Image: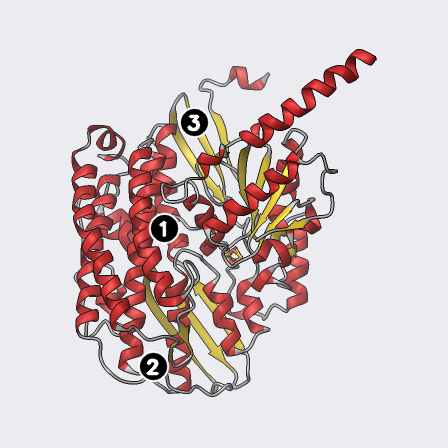
Amino acid sequence: MDTQQEPRKTFVVPIGPQHPALKEPGHFEITVDGEIVTAATVRLGYVHRGIEKGVEQRNWAQAMYMLERICGICSHVHATAYALGVEALAGVQAPPRAQAIRVLVAELERVHSHLLWLGVAAHEGGFDTLFMYSWRDREMIMDVLEGLTGNRVNYSCNVLGGVKFDVDDTQADAIRRAVDFLEPRTHHYLKVVTTDETLIGRTRNVGKMTFLEAETLGTVGPTARASGVPRDIRVDSPYAAYPDFPVKTITATAGDLEAKFVVRIQELFESYRVIREILDKLPAGDLAVRVKPRVPPGETVSRVEAPRGELFYFLKSAGGPNPDRVKVRTPSLCNWGSVLATAPGHKLADVPMLIAGIDPCFSCNDRLVTVRRRSTAETWTWAKLRQYGIEYYR
Amino acid sequence: MGNQSLLQAIMNPLRTWARVNSPFAIHFNSGSCNGCDIEILATLTPRYDIERFGIKLQGSPRHADVLICTGPVTRQARDRLVRIYEQMPDPKFVVAVGSCGISGGVFQGCYNIVGNLADVIPVHAFVPGCPPRPEAIIYGVVALLNSLKQPAPKAPDAEAVA
Ligand code: SF4
C-alpha cells in the first residue's frame, strides 16, 4: 500500500534472461516512469563457464581451442590474440604469409560479424526485411570461410606459430567473387539505413553519446568510433600483417544509433579493400614455424581489434606446458556502460535497439571480476572458484 | 467414460498432426559460445528457411512445443533452464544443439559448468557438431517431428540424429 502514497510511481521491467530480443541470456532491470526509462541495470554471468581458469588445466596448444570458443562470432580474433601473445613469449614470429592469412580471415570475420549485426539490429528495430537480406548475403562469406577452413563458425585457422591452411588460387577467386557480390549490396544497405524513414525514426538521435561520454565510459570499437573517438588497434598498434596492409579508421560524429550503423557499414568497405589487397599481394613462404610445447617464463600483453572493439589478452607463463594465467578483456564488457548511461530518457521500446547498438556478445563478457588492493591479492584455486560459484549462484 | 476414449481416439491423431505440422520452437542458450546460436538463427534466414517445415521460432516458453537448447549448463543458467522447461506446456520436446549440449564439449570440467543438457532436463534429440551446420539442425528437428508421427512411446531415452 505504501506505493500508492508515493508521489511518482515507477515500475521495474525485468527483461531476460530468456527473451525473444536477446539471443543469449542476460538480465536487465529497466526502471520506467510511464514509458520513459529512468534507470537501467544489467546482470550478466549466465554464460560464465570459467574459461580463464579452464585454460590453466590445458596445455598451450589446447588452450587455443578453448579460448576460440569464448565467442562463436569472433572466434578468430581470440585465437589470433592468443597465438600472437604466445609467439611473443616464445620469441618466435609467424611467417609473413601466415600473418597475412590471419588478417585475411580476421577481415572476413569482420564482414560476417558486421552483416550479422546489421541484421540483428534491424530486427530489433522491427525491420525484418533487412534482417533477412543481410543474413542471406552473409551466407556468401560463410561459404568462403567454410571453403577456406572447413567450418562455418569456430574456424580454428591459427596454430601456435602460424596458420593451418593455405589460400590457393581457386579459393582466392571464390573470395574475390564473394566480395564483388557484397560490395554493391553494402552500398545498398548504406543507402537504406540513411534514407529509410522507418529505420531513421528508430535510430536518428537515439542513444546519443558525445565524444566526451564515449571517452569517459571507456567504450571501444565501432561504439566509440561512432562518437568520433578514433580508437582502432589495427591503426594504433598494428599487429600481424596490418603494418603491411594498413586500414583507415572510420569515424562518425553524431554518436547516435544511426552513426553506429553507418560506421559499421563503412568499415565493411574498408574490409573489402583489405581483403582484395591481401589476395593480390599475398607474401610467399611458409605457413608456420615451430613453437616448443614449453613456453619460456614471462608475461605479455596482446591486443587485437575484434569486430566489436579492442580485445585484450594478458598471458603469463611459468615455463611449464600450461599457461600460468590468461586474462581476457573483451570489447562487449567495455561497452555495457554506454548502454546503461544512455538508456535513461529514452522510451522503453528503444532499449532493445540501444542494447543491440553496441553489438553485445554475452558469451564474451561473462567473466569473474574482483577488485581488490594489491596487498590483498591472492591466487584463486580451482576448488575455491568452484565453491565461490556454487555460493554465488545459490 | 466410453465417450472420452472415443474423443481421444479422434483427437489424438489430430493433435499429432497439428503438432508435427506446425511446432513452435523456443531457443535458450544455457552457456554456449553463441556459435550454435547464430547457426540456429541462420536456419531462419532465406537460405535455410526452417519455416517451410512449419517450424516457427518464437519468444515465450508458454507457447512452445520444442525447446532448442545450446551449450553446456552453467550454474547460473541451470535454474532458468529448468524454469523455462517447466513453463512449457506438455507434451514438450527438447533438441540439444552442439557438442556442448551433448557432452559439455570443450568446456567439460570447467568449474562453473553443471554438466551437459541431459543432466538437467530430458533431451529427445541431439545434434552434434561444433557448431552443427544449419542443415543438421533442421534435420535434427525434422527427425524429431517424424518420430512423433509413429505412435511410439515418447522417447525418454534420447535418440541421436545426424
Ligand atoms: S558446440 Fe561449439 S559452437 Fe556450439 S556452443 Fe559449444 S563450443 Fe560453441
Mark 2 or 3, closer to the camera = 2
Same chain for marks 1 and 3?
yes
- Report the front residue among B158 and B89: B158
- Protein chain holding label 1: A
Percent position (x, y) of residue A38?
39, 30
Provide the secondary structure element on which disc 1 rests.
helix
Alpha carbon separation for disc pair 2 and 3: 56 Å
Left or right of A214, for residue A83: right
How crowded is the residue under tag 3: few (<14 C-alpha within 10 Å), some, or many (20+)?
Answer: many
Q: Residue at x 56, y 73 (%)?
A: A56
Q: Name the amino acid type tagged 2.
A: Leu
User: In this figure, which residue is indicated by the disc labeled 3?
Assistant: A32
Give the secondary structure at mark 3.
strand
Q: Can residue A213 be seen in the rendering of this structure? A: yes
Q: Secondary structure at mark 2?
A: loop
Q: Residue at x 27, y 47 (%)?
A: A213
Q: Amino acid at mark 1?
A: Asn
Q: Earlier in the sequence, mark 1 or mark 3?
A: 3
Residue bearing mark 1: A335
Disc marking residue A287: 2
Instruction: Tell me whether the residue at label 2 lies in contact with that at label 3, contact meaning CB atoms closer than 8 angstroms.
Output: no
Residue A113 left/right relative to B108: left
In the image shown, does B49 or A211 lie closer to the viewer?
B49
Viewer-nearest of discs 1 and 3 = 1
